[in-house]
Each structure stands twice: as structure tokens, then as C-alpha cells.
Image (cartoon, rainbow, N blue to C red):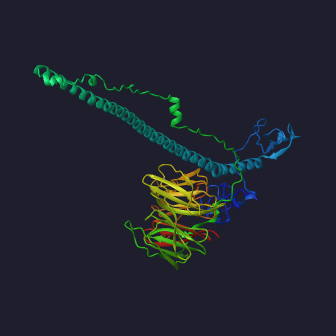
Amino acid sequence: MAAQFIVTCEYCDNPSECFCNPCQKRICTNCVTLHLQQKSEDGHEIVCNTKRKNKYTSHKCKPHADLECPLFCKTCDVPICTKCATGKHRTHDFDDLEERIDNVANCMSREQWELDYTLKPLYQKILEQIMFRMSTVRKHFRSLSDSVTQLGTVWHQIVDEVIVDVKNDLMQDEIDQLHLLEQEKVVFQEVMNEIHNTIKENSNLSSSKNRAKLLHYKSEIKSLSSIPPLTEFVPSQFEPKLPTKEILRELFGVIKKYEIVNLPGYTVPMEPPVKLSKCFLKQPVLISQFDTSFPADDQGNKVYDLVAVSHGRFWATGYSRILKLFDSKGDAIDSITLGHKSSYISGLADGLLLYSDQSDNTVKKIESDGSVQTLIRTGEWVPKGVTSSVENDGQKIFLCLHKKESHKVVKYNNIGVCDLEFEYPGDHHPLYITINKNGDIGTTDHHQNSVAVLDKLGHPRFIYTGNREIGKIKSFKPISITTDCFCNFLISDWSNHVVHVLNGDGVFLRLIALKQGIKEPRGLCVLGEGLLSVGECATGMIKVLKYLKT
């Protein structure tokens, strides 16, 4: 059945059963006494809604200026007086003018409600999504531009290496030719030396006039007349091959042009849903509070993360290697000792636990017998917030990863193989993570003081940076995040000692605070039956409170 438009009391959110005619105010039965205490020059007249009298300015008849118009001619679509009704309009259809104006006023009131609470938030969220997508597009194209620059650097290196190789080849050709010529030079230098020696010997023999030596003279001219072979070279040539700009562009890389997918418009149903605020208790009730006995780290933090399991129980982790299992009353049920401290834990559908181990950059699973199995290895990436979700093809694990100035969320299957990586704006540092029943992925960033939500395909839904309309409130400092059965997102605000509640579209619903106070909330988990468990990082206390009607 479609939800009905509810006219609420002007003093509270309850439906109004009464109306004060002089004051023109809607009142519920609980607030009648409060209204009667208000001073009014015209006094008060409390009636049921069916007997309400709206105050409107009088409407004078145009043909009969001294008469007011109590009727409305439906045929001519004009207000008329009693004379007009018995004269010119006597055969027409009439309505009571006050009744018609009341109907118009009620229609306006309903449209105003729809504008304020349906269309305005919807368009605001669409604009936020567009802004989020714009920042994602800028980041994407900066990344592509960086890739082109890096490829250009590689090309320059390759060209430099090719130049060196070609020069080396030329140098080697030069060395080879000079070596051959040097060998020929040695051969001919030896012949030259022999010629010089022969000339000298012949000259000495001729001058000596020694007949005996002359008789034994042997001519060397024949052997010296035989010229050794020479090597001739066809000169080396460099043939430059300069590719055209078009060929270089094709070799360098091709841009795959973006595609435009026009999503169809749609009509927003103009029947406002029942207010979700009706499901909240006006004032959360403290059910229990207890000390976890976790020691404090260097910054004084004790409790880090909470994760709910079955039967109203939940695990807690702090500055210790020990995970502790509590029930909603604060009774300690069980504990597990880990090899190293962990700030981030999550549950699996089969009741087993996951935790991020930053000592070796892994995600480990704790089996039912207490043994530990390494499920995911993240290499140089440091694992932080972790959560899980069941999809059509099995259980998925979502993990926040950090590496220097790089940040991302990765989805793994149940054996630790990467399925998908989610991109965030460059300034968003996902820390804690949760997934609601719609598959929307919410992450907190306590550096940029924001909450970013993507849909299950990785498309941005909204960014929440606190609600400035709340009043006196310090800067928003989100730490942990969880979700409830209504797909709401609950965010612990460390600096304001409260928990923010957003609906699945990012609309702020309310703050959760206790009269007893919540000191620097960090870990959160919803236990069911309207219960919320909050870990105070500074005190080491856990407070279980009821915030929903059940």
C-alpha cells in the first residue's frame, strides 16, 4: 500500500488531530495544553480538523462590488456572489469558495512537503554525485596524463639508447677498418724496410769493388716488385629513417574515446514515504556500559573496532593482541590471542572472523578451531578497514589499502583473488568501511573529515562532510562506520562525541547522543533489536544503547 501524506503537529512530529481556528495552528491531542498556555489576542478555539476554519482574505464580487463571494462557479472558473448565482450563473455548477480554497491550500501544503522532503534532497544528492563524478573524472584524466608523460620518458630513454647503439656500431666499423689498414701498414712497412736495406747493401757492394762478393750477388728486385694485395673499402653509410608524426602517434598509443550512455529520466513518485524518524527513539536509552580493559596506545586510544556476530554478541579489538567477545550486557564470553595487534576486524557470513595484519600486510581468517589462515596478501599496500558482503556469486571481502599517497578499496572473492578496484577522489583516504543491504560501500576519512559512498559498481553516490545546520558543533571528525537494517549509515564523530545517522541517499537524519555522554566514539556495530554498541577509544568503555523502536 502506498504511504499516506501525514499532517503533523506544529509542536512535535505526531499526527495533528486538532486545529486552533484563531491561531491557525495544527495541534495533536498531547500538545493542546501547551498551546492553550500561549498568549493570543483572539483567544483560542480548539476544534477537530473537520471543523477547522481557515482565515483567508475576503473576495469581493467584480459585478457587485459591495458583496463578498461565498461561491465558486466551476463552469466559468471564477468566484461569484449570491446575486451572480441567481442571475448570470444560475444554470452553472457551484462549489463552496472556502471549501475550494481549503482544497487548494491542502494541495499546496502537500506539494510543499514533497518539494522540501522529496525533490529538494533528491536533486541535492544528484548534484553532489555529479560533483563527486567530476572530481573522479579529473583524477582519471590526471592519471592518464601521467601515464602519457611516463611513456614519453620511456620513449626518450629508448631513443637515447638507440642513438648510443648506432654510434657504437659506427665506432666499431671505424675500429675494424682501422685495424685492417693497420695490418696492411705493417706489411708494407716491412717491405719498405727491406727495400731500404737492399739499396744500402747494393750501394756498399758497388763501392767496395769486391769481385768475389759481386760474383755471389743475388737480385731481390723480382721479389720486391711483387706488390702485396691492398684492401679497399666501400664507405659505411647512415641511412636515416624518420617516421611521420602519424606513424609515431599510432605507435605511441591510441586513445579509446569515451562513450556517452544516456540514462533515462524518471518520475519521482509524489507520495512521500512514512518518516523514518518515526522509527527512532526520541532519546536513546543506555542499556549497559562496561570496561574492556584494553591498554592505551601512544595516543591514549584503547578501543579500535567492533563487529557484531549472532545472538547479540560482538567482538572488540583494541591496543592488544587479544580479541574479546562480549554480549550486550557486557559479559565476557570468549577471547582469541593474535600474533600481532590489529585495529580492523570484520565478520564473515559463516561466523568466522577476518582481521588486517599490518605486520606483514595480509588479511587473515580465524577458523572455528582458533587457527589462523592467511587469506589475502597485499604486497606493498598496507591493509586497513575490512568488511564482507554476500553477493550472487558468493562471499566478497572489501579492503581499504594505503601506500604512501595512494589509496584504494579492493574487492576480493572468498579465496582472496582481486575482483575489482574502486577509485576515489585523490584526497579521500578510506579508513573504515561498511556495506549496506543495497550494496552501497561507505568509507570514512578522518584526514579529510568526510564519508564517501559508492554504489556496488563503484559509481559515486554521495560525500558527507557533516551537517552545519545542527548548531553548535565542532568540526566533523569521522572514524568508524556501520549500517543498520534500514540501510542507514551510522558514523562515529570523535570530536563531537556523537554518532551521525544518514539514510541510504546521504540525507542527514539525526545525531545519536546519550545524557550520560559518549567519550570520543570510535568502534561501532549494530546488534539488532534496535541496539547499537559504541566503543570509546579514550576510556576503553563500551556503551550499548537502544536507538530504534522495536
The N terminus: image quadrant: bottom right
Q: Quadrant of residue 533?
A: bottom right
Answer left or right for 36 relative to 156. Answer: right
Answer left or right for 519 relative to 114. Answer: left
Name the residue nearer the viewer: 100 or 12.
12
Residue 95 can be seen, yes or no: yes
Going 60% across and 73% down the picture, which residue do you hit? Answer: 310
Question: Residue 409: image x %, image y %?
Answer: 53, 56
Question: Residue 325: image x %, image y %?
Answer: 52, 75
The C terminus: image quadrant: bottom right
Q: Quadrant of residue 7?
A: bottom right
Name the residue nearer the viewer: 290 or 294.
294
Q: Quadrant of residue 230?
A: top left
Vertical position of residue 513 compared to residue 24: above or below: below
Question: Residue 496: image x %, image y %?
Answer: 47, 61
Residue 492 can be seen, yes or no: no
Answer left or right for 285 relative to 214. Answer: right
Question: Residue 433: image x %, image y %?
Answer: 53, 60
Vertical position of residue 15 compared to residue 213: above or below: below
Vertical position of residue 232 compared to residue 537: above or below: above
Residue at far left of view:
208
Going 54% across and 70% down the picture, which residue do you hit? Answer: 353
Vertical position of residue 49 compared to residue 371: above or below: above
